[in-house]
Image (spheres, grey):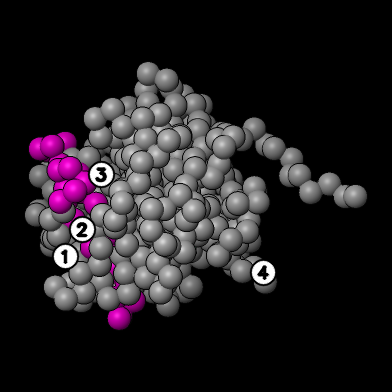
Amino acid sequence: MYKTEKRKCGELFTRYRNNPILSASDWPYCVNSVFNAGATIVGDETLLLVRVEDRRGISHLTVARSKDGFSDWKVDSEPTFVPDPENYPEDIWGIEDPRITKLDEGDIWGITYTSYSAGGPLVSLATTRDFRQFKRLGSMTHPENKDAALFPCRFKGRWAMIHRPSTTFNLGAHIWISFSPDMTHWGEHRILIPARSGAWWDANKVGLNSPPLRTEEGWLILYHGVRQTAAGSLYRLGLALLDLDNPGKLIRRSDEWVFGPDQVYERMGDIADVVFPCGWVLDEKKDEIRLYYGAADTVMAVATASFKNVMNYIKSCPKVDVS
Ligand code: BMA
């Protein structure tokens, strides 16, 4: 027998021993897969807004709640937030991959998600106060664009959003930032984290994962790099740090990926070799980040890291030269 275990290189994240935490068999109704959930804390519970793909291939979002954030998930008995193509034609082929941001102003969450329109995926926005009723603000971008999240606060009076437009130019799908006075009209678009090129793990295509996490050192960013191989796409995760007052400024970026497909549930499923978080939760008292991620576009899993270790790691990563 040959060894298949990869050498562990001081991994920052530790997978929960009972992964996966949610799968189609846990669902109260018949579905194909449950993955790529947004995450937040509501009261004393961890709330996941899970992407659920039905057996037509169309996705909607359903809430799952847990007291400890690991086990005993209570799943809404019916879909919580569904596509509304009659009023929002961009939802025609479903809604996917929600990112949840608790806004500093008001007791309200902003949810960015992908609407799968006839012209390709684009970014939509909704708000909620309770994850039962949602107010739709409609599409924020034209296609193709996805992997978006709001920052929780305004910068010099304007909201900020990270997103990932796709173009055919130079093979590059980069992470962008834009600003808005009203959360609807977005402008001042610029590249924030460019895809690298050649053999790099994050060559040609990158995108935001969990929403920006506010820390004393800056905004902590988790993003994916997609490596195209003869066997398909390989999704891995890296970290970056943005200036706290000026989030358009990238300060540091990890050269190496910090998390990638390894376990069977990440390497086998509808889409092999994908780890795809849309949410994370910081428990400062426990010094714990809980990273919620879709595995192989099939199930939900969670991994934890020491927040201190993550910050020490990103502070040791190369400074980005923007000159
Ligand atoms: C991305 C997104 C994710 C998905 C990933 C891997 O483009 O669409 O929803 O998890 O591809 O298939």
- Label located before the other in sequence (2 or 3): 3
Q: Which residues are magenta?
A: 104-133
Residue 311, how many percent across, how many down? 45, 29
Q: Examine the image and state in which quarter residue 147 appears.
A: bottom left
Which of disc 3 and disc 1 is earlier in sequence?
Answer: 3
Residue farthest top in this picture:
285
Q: Is residue 311 left or right of residue 249?
A: right
Q: Is residue 276 located in the magenta-colored stretch of the structure?
A: no
Q: Amino acid at mark 4?
A: Ala
> In the rendered view, would you say 4 is above or below 81?
above
Residues at circles 1 and 2 in contact by the CB criterion of under 8 Å: yes
**Side of 141 relative to 211 (left or right):** left
Secondary element type, mark 4? loop
Residue 92: image location, x then y, percent: 27, 76
Which disc, if any, is residue 231? 4
Amino acid type shown at disc 3: Thr
Q: Is residue 269 visible?
A: yes
Mark 3 highlights which residue? 101
